[in-house]
Image: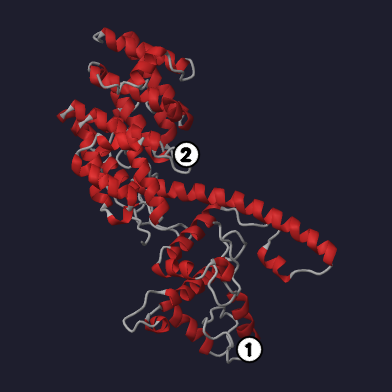
Amino acid sequence: MSYHRNYRHNNDYKADEHRSKGTSRYSQSRKRGSDGNLRTHGDSEPAASGRNTKDHRSTDNRHPSFTTPESQGPVSRIRDWGDEVEADEMRTNVQRDIQRYRRRILTADFAQRERKTSSGSSDSRDSRDSPIPGDIETDEVVLMRRQKQINYGKNTLAYDRYIKEVPKHLRQPGVHPRTPNKFKKYSRRSWDQQIKLWRVKLHAWDPPAQDGHDLQAIEEIDLDDIMDIELDVECSPDPEADAVSPTSNNASSSNDSCTATPSKMMKTDETEMA
Amino acid sequence: MEESKIQSFDEETQKLLKSALKEPNKVDLEILSKAIVDKSMKDIFICKDAGPVCYAIVQTEAKQCNTSVFRRKLLTRLQQEFSAREETRKRSIQEWVCVVTFICNIFDYLKVNNEPMVALVDPIYDCLFRLARPDALLNDEEVNCLVVQLHRVGEQLERMNSQRMDELFYLLRDGFLLQESLSSMTRLQLLEILEFRASGWTLTDTAQHYYYSEVVD
């Protein structure tokens, strides 16, 4: 059930076909070609234009696998319909999620303010679970990336078994993994770490290994993630180390940054958009 | 509704369809999508039923398995057919017409979060532009396909890219006015579609007849 993304570099499109993307979009709908002549047909380019029509969407000659650190990975210049539709779907889902989330925190926020004024005490869960309505992550690129990471985790057998076994109302913070809240503002590093830890915790629900013991399954799995985490903890106190093994909540190190960080990381916020 | 649509397929495909609608993860969805597309390419009437059937499968799979394998397989196959359309057209006008009809059908029925699939907009325009070329306007089958699809998905297409629709209609108008060897039926159809769009994509009685032309005689 993993998320497949095939970027195929089919040179299926004929040289004279146009896709209205990027700079070609407007040329497609222009009445005249770049040589000034009236276009007789919508789907052919005047021969004299000298444009490279084979791959007209790229204005540079980048290798198809070119990717910047911030982009979502290799982008095929020839679009795959399946990929496009799935990306569209995710985008509209994310947009719908934003609306729902906004409504939800607005009503929650309102309700809590009511309680606050009457009881006079502040609920410590406020600041964590209900960000100021204006202060949520709305950058589509970021939300899409985060949603993809969440999807990777949710597309696992472990997650399936987890949600069947532990209904939401029975979940205990710290014990049960919570899906990181993609709408809260986090640094990239912080977010990636939350995802890592969340996925590691989910492994507790992996289908039984040969010995049939769930805990065994964790230790048998050779995860780079876990290896990194354990090393960070065992090293001498390192202020950079925000990576902590979930099994070492009570870190033997007395370093403040080490003990403080785990509890902060553990309480990952969850927005289950049902 | 689906029951009658399913009946238009052959026995074997029907069986696959019925199982897919009950338990999508027990069926090889790649084989199913191939069967549906193969059958649709051969028969224009099946093309029209394929849309709602495919939609039903996609919905079922999404609800029960939370995956979209069928849709992906279907789109991949459609994309291949689209890429090979010029060869297909040379080989058989009927098949080419089925390709266009099928893609438009899918565009019409398979909505994503209630929105049409953006990925299909340009390919459909490409097909319609091809159908509006002088050599295609000489064939009744192609003209028929062109006007039927415009009736069906024209408004949605225009909403998603009005510039290309404008250009397409320049072609149609020029064809109607300037092309000499058109049959009178073709001229009538072109005139009708020009009026149809001009009145805001409203169905006239004549258009109604063409749009619901699947009445079995």
In the image, is residue A211 above or below residue B72? Answer: below
What is the x, y in percent for residue B111? 43, 40
Q: Is residue A71 left or right of residue B13?
A: right
Total label count?
2
Mark 2 lies on a secondary structure that is loop
For the residue pair B91 and A273, the one nearer the viewer reads as: A273
Tell me the amino acid under the disc marked 2. Glu
Q: Is residue A241 left or right of residue B191?
A: right
Q: Chain of mark 2?
A: B
Q: Residue at x 43, y 22 (%)?
A: B166
Residue that label 2 marks: B115
Q: Is residue A132 left or right of residue B202?
A: right
Q: Chain of mark 1?
A: A
Q: Is residue B192 left or right of residue A255?
A: left
Tell me the amino acid under the disc marked 1. Asn
What is the x, y in percent for residue A162? 46, 70
For the residue pair B132 and A178, the one nearer the viewer reads as: A178
In the image, is residue A257 above or below residue A143? Answer: below
What is the x, y in percent for residue B122? 38, 34
Residue that label 1 marks: A255
Asked if one can make out residue A44 in the rendered structure from this viewpoint, the answer is no
Would you call the spot at circle 2 few (<14 residues within 10 Å), some (14-19), or many (20 or more)? Answer: some
Asked if one can make out residue B147 in the rendered structure from this viewpoint, the answer is yes
